Image (cartoon, rainbow, N blue to C red):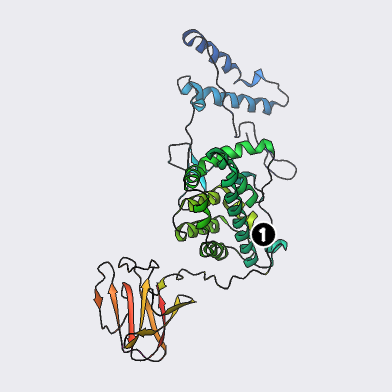
Amino acid sequence: MAPQKNKSGFVLPQIVDPPRKCVKIWIPNEVYHRGAFWGAIFELCQAYNWQQNPPEKAREVANLWFDIWSEATRENNDMTCCDDVQVLKRINPVTGNVEQSSNGGATWTPEAGNLQSVIVTPVPPVTSGVAATKCDAATNVSGQVQVWIDQVSNDFTTAVSLLEFGLAVIQAILVAVLTILSAGALTPIEAVVLPTIGAALAAAWAAGKAAFDAYWTTDIKDDIFCAAFCNISDDGSYTDAQFSAFWNKCNSDLPASPAKMLFMGFLSSVGRAGLNAMAASGASADGDCSDCHCDDCDNILYAPPGTGAIEYLGDCKYRLTSFADGGQQSVYAWFNNSTGTFDPNACGTINTVVVTTGAIDGQGYNECVTGTLHNPVLSLVGIPMAQAYLYSSAPFVVEITVD
């Protein structure tokens, strides 16, 4: 039967179109009653047994029953669609979103009935006038993260059990994303959020309030703020890809801790919809994002403890200023290593070296993995290294671009 259209030209759904519901039927005696049952059902497959006006609707209903009858009898009179299906759930390690699978993990889809499904995604804050710039919107995100931190910290004091703490943390999540739920909707949401953050809840509860509070240093909160700013659209909102980039930036940059586990679970449970709600909270104006460097080269070069200054200039360029190193001026630069201890496995490469003040007398580097020192060398460009070393008889400044 050809698809029908209404007056506006839209295709009307047919009776045989999905979604369909599966019904379990109890047959008292498999031997004697099964054949009789399916014989009776077969009569429903005949259009003449249905109302004939309009006749095409009768044929449509009969076709639906014929599909059901054919599928069930083909499967040895066993309606396999009614079999209980095991649903697996996970947090996608790339996107940060909660997903489910009904085929043993072969394919994954967004979790049904999750918290994100009841969050209303607002108009982008810059478009709506809630925020003047995307920096304001990112500042709103940072402010709502602080709301979450403060409320979870308070939950340690008010909760008397792990379960009570878990339910209180869910309330903190709802406050942070400005979600208002009815009492009837809250219980199912608790049921889907608790497993998502369960392990993190247990770890955070065991570590205690003091450890949770101590984790949230200014540097960590600044990292979250800049991750929010560097992955937000000009209109102050996030796409699915931008939410994933924000989630991964936080996951890779924040130091390990039960507090971090709980925060990442918070982000996974609210997803893109929640992050957009946080960005549109309207609590910020005139945000300052000048300290956020949003290219991939930020945080690559570090000055070892007690050595000269290294300043990031943007666009993968660093300025290195020499310091008094015994009887000479020197610069040391570690790649991807802020630990305070030299690590030959933390490596990178230099693309260009430009002396902007003074002159250098020599340069060298430490190999990746082995840490072997090569000094002097004619050029540092294009060599995988864990540390670069430049020296001179007088103060100097160099600008280096890195990869």
Residue located at (56% from left, 62% from top): 228
What is the residue that sits farthest to the right in this orientation?
7
Q: Residue 73, can we see it?
A: yes
Q: Quadrant of residue 279?
A: bottom right
Q: In this view, does 19 lie to the left or right of 298?
A: right
Q: In this view, does 177 lie to the left or right of 255?
A: right
Image height of 65 relative to 110, above or below: above
Image height of 40 relative to 20, above or below: above
Q: Which amino acid does label 1 sit on?
A: Pro
Tag 1 residue: 124
What is the residue that sits farthest to the top in this orientation?
32
In terms of secondary structure, what is the magenta stretch mainly?
loop
| Nearest the eye: 295 or 72 | 295
Q: Quadrant of residue 334?
A: bottom left
Query: Is label 1 in a helix, a strand or a loop?
Result: loop
Image height of 132 relative to 277, above or below: below
**Range of residues picked out in magenta:** 358-362
Neighbour class for label 1 at 10 Å: few (<14), some, many (≥20)? many
**Percent x, y of residue 2:** 63, 36
**Percent x, y of residue 275:** 60, 55
| Nearest the eye: 58 or 124 | 124
Is 300 one of the magenta-colored residues? no
**Percent x, y of residue 307:** 38, 78
Please identify the quadrant where the N terminus is shown: top right
Q: How many marks?
A: 1
**Percent x, y of residue 366:** 28, 74
Q: Residue 3, can we see it?
A: no
Please identify the quadrant where the C terminus is shown: bottom left
| Nearest the eye: 283 or 5 | 283
Residue located at (40% from left, 73% from top): 301
| Nearest the eye: 344 or 49 | 344
